[in-house]
Amino acid sequence: MKQTTSIIGCGRWASFLSWYSSQLGHDTMLYGRPQSERLQRLRQTRKNDYLELPATVQVTDDLERVVNHSAYLLVAIGAQNLREFCQQLPPAALRAKTVVLCMKGLEVTSGSRLTQVVRGVGGVQNNVAVWVGPGHVQDFVRQIPNCMVIGSEDIDTTRALVERYSSPLIRLYMGQDLIGNEVGAAAKNVMGIAAGMLDGLGLSALKGALMARGAREIARLIRAMGGNELTAYGLAHLGDYQATLFSTHSHNRRFGEMFIAGQPFDQLAEGVATLDALMLLSEKHVVDMPITHALHCIIHEEQEPRTVLQQLLLRPVKHEF
């Protein structure tokens, strides 16, 4: 089989991965749904708001072609659409592929990690990985480098992916704590929403407390789920805080800021669904998650944001993180 890389999705991260794969000299295909307006724009102009696709990137809506002709499938779609995507494929379609989930989230209805969704639907075993960590398309296309992590449960799969996709622009590290990397990467988006709310309330100085306590909260959950709690302090979670809690490019931070202003947000903020999934996991694993609970009270129970966040982050010292 020809070692083609196929990118599933045509949003900002998927289009960047197509651009990046081509820059590395790989034969690259980008897939989007036939009815996708983003796909039509890329077909017509080869451009979106972030970059211009090289002529070497093939753009298609033929899913069968993409799957059959590629050894590597890099999936970059909304986390809540992953199960439906996998169900479109024949049961054995993913088993001979290396599937890399370049997305951050948890399934909202079940709290399942995304690798669990792929394995459950597609029957994939060791050849499924995640690609997570800090980095924005807007920075990468300006040649501003960053570090990210690829992880799976099979060291040979991880090593092969890191060697294939590392470059001076993206320094990839090997991460074998799949639970910690998946949960940490998803949960940092929830912390991004909290950071945006603090920005909207003029309480940005409390981001330090949010970072310290947020990482500790997620570390407890990772440990309860069977992962390594130290992973919460790595690239997938704490290492991604700068890009999520502070950057103007962060959708989740922007969602929180606009929520405070009472303004609608028309982009994907994956942290909203992840918040609900974390509430499920908190109950299932009996883990106290005060930040997660506070955001749930604000977003879903319509409690007053300033009061809730100040009570949360300015608690007496006697309370542990």
Image (cartoon, rainbow, N blue to C red):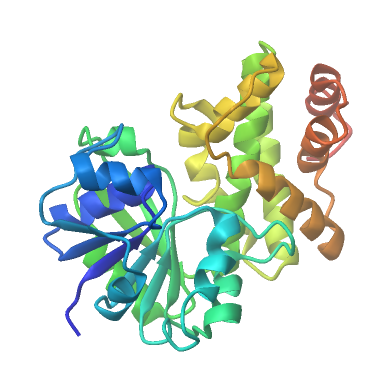
Q: Nearer the viewer, residue 208 or 124?
A: 124
Could you tell me if residue 147 is visible in this image? no
Task: Identify the residue at horizontal 50%, vertical 26% (top origin).
Answer: 246
x, y percentage for residue 31?
Answer: 33, 60
Is residue 319 found left or right of 81 in the rendered image?
Answer: right
Q: Nearer the viewer, residue 96 or 133?
A: 96
The mark tally for this picture is 0
Q: Nearer the viewer, residue 244 or 78?
A: 78
x, y percentage for residue 136?
Answer: 37, 38
Q: Nearer the viewer, residue 148 or 234?
A: 148
Task: Identify the residue at horizontal 67%, vertical 66% (top origin).
Answer: 112
x, y percentage for residue 242?
Answer: 48, 33
Q: Quadrant of residue 145?
A: top left
Instruction: Please determine whether, in this image, residue 240 is positioned above or below residue 55.
Output: above
Could you tell me if residue 180 is visible in this image? yes
Q: Quadrant of residue 202?
A: top right
Residue farthest to the top, as pictured: 202
Is residue 71 found left or right of 321 in the rendered image?
Answer: left
Look at the image and tell me in which quarter the N terminus lies: bottom left
Task: Identify the residue at horizontal 28%, vertical 36% (top origin).
Answer: 48
x, y percentage for residue 247?
Answer: 46, 27
Look at the image and tell me in which quarter the C terminus lies: top right
Task: Identify the residue at horizontal 59%, vertical 51% (top origin).
Answer: 186
Is residue 265 found left or right of 40 in the rendered image?
Answer: right
Q: Quadrant of residue 3?
A: bottom left
